[in-house]
Image (spheres, helix red, strand yellow):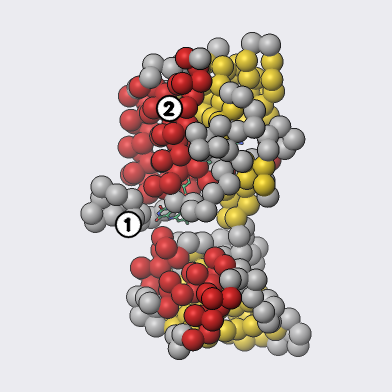
Amino acid sequence: MYDVIIIGGGPAGLTAAIYTGRAKLKTLVLESAMPGGNAGQTDQIDNYPGFPFGINGADLMENFLKQAQRFGTELRIEEVTGIEESPGGKRVVTSQGEYLARSVIITVGARRRELEVEGEKEFLGRGVSYCATCDGAFFHNVPVAVVGGGDSAVKEALYLADIASRVYLIHRRDCFRANQTAVDKMLASDRIELKLNQVVKRIAGNGMMQNVILQDVNSGAEESLQAEGLFVSIGLVAAADFIEGLLATEDGYIVTDEHMATSVPGIFAAGDIRCKTARQVATAVGDGALAGIAVTEYLKE
Ligand SMILES: Cc1cc2nc3c(=O)[nH]c(=O)nc-3n(C[C@H](O)[C@H](O)[C@H](O)COP(=O)(O)OP(=O)(O)OC[C@H]3O[C@@H](n4cnc5c(N)ncnc54)[C@H](O)[C@@H]3O)c2cc1C
């Protein structure tokens, strides 16, 4: 029996573990892949406070893990497939077995929605990115493209217009779902060129990405666009399929209060899997700390 099981070993989960470990709660982190989450797969993190020259995401997350383990956190590499209420507490079912805990913190993050086109995986980190705030700085004075038509795509294009030499905004329709003020600002920019009624057919290059091949949705005609970066901004997908029907969610994201409590007593959620406006390492860390404190209070009661 654990005091708390934390599902997901990214920034939110490992921060929660630091707090519950320091509170002397018996803590287990269940992680389906490599600990570190999305942050651990990011080459350079420049906007996490405390590192004036930035830090490699894997190095940062290795330190999170060491810190959590210093306070007694146990880590197991197992994918969680379900949570059930049981007379003894919460039963957490994994691909390899099951565990009992007095409380659970869900920190499984969000998956990036992918284009699923040729070259996307090959050029990931070598031109293809899913986060302009994170990776935009690597594209000073070179042409880049953004794909998407919602608020985040327009925001990414505006952000990149101050960095790149040219920004192509590729959208499969001829009108935007995004906020009109942001759209007007984008239309007024002489650095952003719209590529409407176009979809990305494939991404090409030689080691590094060099071109995006577009296809017109009406005529089928293809066009090759020279761009060294492609920012895919077609949304995120919540990563917690196993909570369906168990907790209150919106679009798959878990609804919490300001203490990270979900609709089920004893189950908390933190980080990108939560309904929230900004999905960043700093906000995941803040959520994780709050969840760790809230669980400690909950178990005292
Ligand atoms: C390419 C990229 C670059 C980024 N760059 C930056 C940046 O520079 N600065 C910044 O602040 N933010 C950046 N972000 C955002 C940042 O990485 C996230 O906001 C942050 O990692 C969220 O932390 P989290 O712990 O909530 O979730 P995640 O980091 O997604 O971690 C969730 C963990 O849960 C695990 N998991 C999922 N399902 C299960 C399951 N069923 N069972 C067990 N484990 C499971 C996953 O394997 C993962 O390790 C970037 C994101 C991406 C995708």
Relative to 230, is 219 on the left or the right? right
Residue 264 or residue 78, whichever sits in front? 264
| Residue at screen point 63% across, 45% down | 253
Can residue 192 be seen by looking at this rendering?
yes
2 or 1: mark nearer the eye? 2
| Residue at screen point 33% across, 44% down | 59
Whether the residue under disc 1 has CB within 8 Å of ligand 1: yes
Secondary structure type for disc 2: helix
User: Tag 1 or tag 2, which sits nearer the N-term?
Assistant: 1
Residue 198 or residue 77, whichever sits in front? 198
| Residue at screen point 34% across, 31% down | 66
Task: Point out residue 6 in the picture as x, y percentages from the top left corner.
Answer: 52, 28
Residue 222 or residue 247, whichever sits in front? 247
Relative to 126, is 5 on the left or the right? right
- What residue does disc 2 label? 293
Task: Point out residue 23 in the picture as x, y percentages from the top left corner.
Answer: 38, 19
Q: Label 1 is placed on what type of residue?
A: Asp
Whether the residue under disc 2 has CB within 8 Å of ligand 1: no
Are there few (<14), some (14-19), or many (20+) residues within 10 Å of tag 1?
some
- What residue does disc 1 label? 46
Relative to 269, is 287 on the left or the right? left
Task: Point out residue 209 in the picture as x, y percentages from the top left corner.
Answer: 48, 72
- With respect to residue 110, does 247 lie above or below? above
Relative to 114, is 245 on the left or the right? right
Secondary structure type for disc 1: loop
Which quarter shows the N terminus? Answer: top right
Task: Point out residue 40 in the picture as x, y percentages from the top left corner.
Answer: 42, 46
| Residue at screen point 37% across, 75% down | 163
